[in-house]
Image (spheres, rainbow, N blue to C red):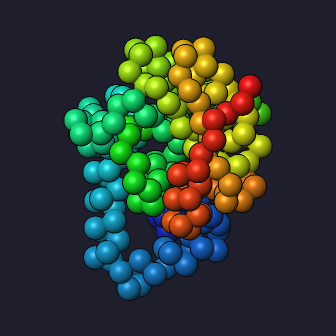
Amino acid sequence: MSAPLLEQLIDALRVLPGVGQKTAQRMAYHLLEREREGGTRLADMLAQAMERIGHCAQCRDFSETDLCPTCANDSRERSQLCVVESPADRLAIENATGFRGVYFVLQGRLSPLDGIGPRELGLEQLDQRLAQGEIGEMIIATSATVEGEATAHYLAQLARARQVRPSRLAQGLPLGGELEFVDRGTLSHAFGSRNEVQE
């Protein structure tokens, strides 16, 4: 016999990051008590998003089309490629800096203990892109965490093997910090003052 629908709803809400049992319970009660119309709209949007949003074939960012708007934009500077961990990081850089190049979204960072290796991050696809010869600089914009630094080191080696100059975001980023939570001014300064990654 399956659990009551209310319990299933609460359990389903717990899939969201930072949402535990109590928060999920409050959300479920709020939707049922005061926001049934909003809950129905949310359910519809979730269903559409899960069905229609995929990944860009070139940069791996979320996209409803084969190429995302950034990759499809012919005015972007193709010789500069910025590698980020997540779509949220790409958006943070896009909003805080004047960067006009293109991106590659890893959708994570190297973490062997969690089973996330080069294959899961699409690094074979990135290597193929670097091999095409149009990229002169690869800006590594991974977080200043242990996994982010390990990922940055791996990416720098990948770039050098293809004669692409690797650079890394500069000072101002807190050690252990996530890019999406850094203020715009700090991120803009770090992006503009990036350094070449040394061997």
Which residue is pictured at 39% across the width and 29% down the height?
Answer: 79
| Image: 151 above or below 188 | above
Asked whether the viewer can see residue 153, the reply is yes
Count of marks, rendered view:
0
Tell me if 34 is positioned left or right of 170 in this view: left
Answer left or right for 30 relative to 180. Answer: left
Residue 31 spot, x, y in % from top left: 41, 77
Write the residue at 49% across / 79% down.
Answer: 29
Res 132 quadrant in image: top left
Identified at 41% across, 84% down, the residue is 33
Q: Is residue 91 visible?
A: no
- Residue 101 point in image, percent of width and height: 38, 40
Decide which of 177, 172 is in the foreground and name it: 172
- Give left or right: position of 137 versus 98: right
Q: Nearer the viewer, residue 17 or 69?
A: 69
For the C terminus, give its image quadrant.
top right
> Is 146 placed left or right of 90 in the picture?
right
Position of residue 122 measured from the top left corner of the image (x, y, whole percent): 51, 26
Taking the spot 50% from the left edge, 75% from the top edge, the residue there is 27
